[in-house]
Amino acid sequence: MPTASPPRGGLASLLRMAARHKGKMSLACGFSLAAQLCAVAPFLVLFVLVGRIAQPQGGAVQPDQVWPLALAAGGCVLLRHAFAAASSALAHLSAFAILHDLRLSIARALPRLPLGSFNETASGQIRKVMLEDVEQMEIFIGHNLPELIGSLLYLLLSTGVLLLVDWRLALASLCLLPVGFLAQALTIARNKDLRTRYFTANERTNAAMVQYVQGMPVIKAFSRTEESLRAYAGSVADCARHEARMCRRWSVPMTVFSVALGANMLVLLPLGAWLHLSGEVDLPTLFLFLLMGLGLGNALQQFMTLGSFLENQAEGRRRIDALLAREPLPEPAAPGQPEGNALALGHVDFAYGDKQVLFDVSARLEPGRFLALVGPSGAGKSTLARLVPRFRDVTGGAITLGGRDIRDMPLDTLMARTTFVFQDVFLFNDTVEANLRVGRPDASPAEMEAAARAARCHKFIAGLPGGYGHVVGERGAVLSGGEKQRICIARALLKDAPILVLDEATAFIDPENEADIQAALGALARNRTLIVIAHRLSTITAADEILVMDRGRVAARGTHEGLLRESPLYARLWQAHLASRNWSFNTGGAA
């Protein structure tokens, strides 16, 4: 599947994302500015207060001189927290709205992708993007962005005030800043490639975790707990190795960074003491610089630390953009509607990348025809069937519906006329009724029951606690394999599409129900185009035409009786099927 290259402008994308709610974000930044102004104000009040106390000619400081200043300082502290709370609230409102939009954008983008692409991307990787990477955007919008702006404004305001008071002590307060910037830049540069590999390893860990949990019944049944856990633990260890390598690369520059930003007192205090003793700086000025200089180092450290987090969030945003940038199935520039439901495959070729798997396959199915695809595993049966509803597009030839190339009609039109029942069935963790209504949400109870009866599943549904209102569990956990498949067949029947594709959909049908299913398939084919992929050849003996696939080509075609006479491959498949039906355990003792 063609995909766009991952976008590299992660930071620019983050800022564009924030700009979607520029009204709220502007107010949040405005409140953040006000909060930082209020953060600087108490230092100025203390500067004035210390100046009054330090004036020997002024005599003792009276309470009526102190209380207004104290109240002003306290009021600034309260206002700072109020403005910060308002800024945080507005930023979080924007963040949650953006998360909502992002997740909906991804949810809307996924159905437009070729369905075959989901076989190439582990569900754990998509899960990480939709949950963890998107959640990082909330941290950026709701926390980091206003805090970054607040720290930057505090630094600018504090630096401006200090420069106005005494430029020498101001430079002393900032003298180690270049060392901190250099260490931070070195940290980011040295870990850029490792950060990308760490995110990739984290995606693989998520995929391994999902597989480990979903495969637990098989793992337990075959006593493969240790081996499966080892595979999962290996992915976790790989992720941990990348994280450890990043930490090792961080250790020295981050230590230099932390020491540099917190060590300005090593320069400021001796210089301030010397200037004060020499009479060039008074005590209130020295007091102001000792207070604000220390706070300046903390603000710088917070600002730079947030900057390092920003790079992680930018990498997450790049992965979100990469998922959203995947090319959807191309829609026709001038779509048209099919005339009828006749389906034709004309010299169809298909390749996965450079590997061609289908060669010059042709067939024509009029409405009401029943086509079966049989052949050894890997012959291309499922690949061919999945081209009909455009799970992927052909690489050669064409598939037409009603005389029109399926690539030249709206995808919604094609989906409305086709239904697919997979071998690997999927049921939602909801009621039987809700799962059936996926086929047609407006179906009446009578229509649902009719579809269930046709698929021979009404009887066991009626026997469930709650009947059609029974919750089937995650992926239909409370049902047997055959029961789940029959519900999926009923769901397909309820959709009532003119083309029905069954991919090994009868694989787990109980032998005693096989005759019923064959009768149901015969009823289904009436006024429908039916394509069935089956290893259980007894379910397709009534097919109007059977294509025998071998290595991506049509090795033979005809009816069941004719192929038994004319196709050695089909005859072997039939004999293998009969042998499997008669096979049983030999419980007798050795001769």
Image (cartoon, helix red, strand yellow):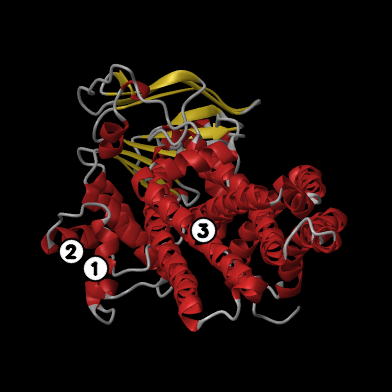
Q: Earlier in the sequence, mark 1 or mark 2?
A: 2
Q: Amino acid at mark 3?
A: Gln
Q: Is residue 171 visible?
A: yes
Alpha-carbon span between mark 3 and mark 2: 67 Å
Tell me residue 419's x, y (percent).
Answer: 32, 43
Placement of the C terminus among the 4 image quadrants? bottom right
- Label of residue 458 in the image: 1
Q: Tell me which residue sits at (24%, 29%) in the image.
A: 341
Q: Which mark is residue 36?
A: 3
Q: Does residue 108 lie above or below 443 as drawn?
A: above
Q: Which mark is residue 449?
A: 2
Write the residue at 33% across / 35% down: 544
Q: Secondary structure at mark 2?
A: helix
Tell me the distance, in whole angstroms, between the alpha carbons under discs 1 and 3. 68 Å
| Residue 273 or residue 21, whichever sits in front | 273
* Three-letter code, disc 1: His
Picture coordinates of residue 408 (x, y %)? 33, 20
Callout 3 touching callout 2 (CB < 8 Å): no
Left or right of residue 521: residue 553: right
Residue 47 position, x and y percent, is 61, 65
**Earlier sequence position, callout 1 versus callout 3:** 3
Above or below: residue 198 compared with residue 325: below
In this rendering, the label closer to the viewer, 1 or 3: 3
**Within 10 angstroms of label 2, few (less than 14), some, or many (20 or more) residues?**
many
The answer to whether residue 582 is visible is: no
- Tell me: residue 39, above or below residue 68: above
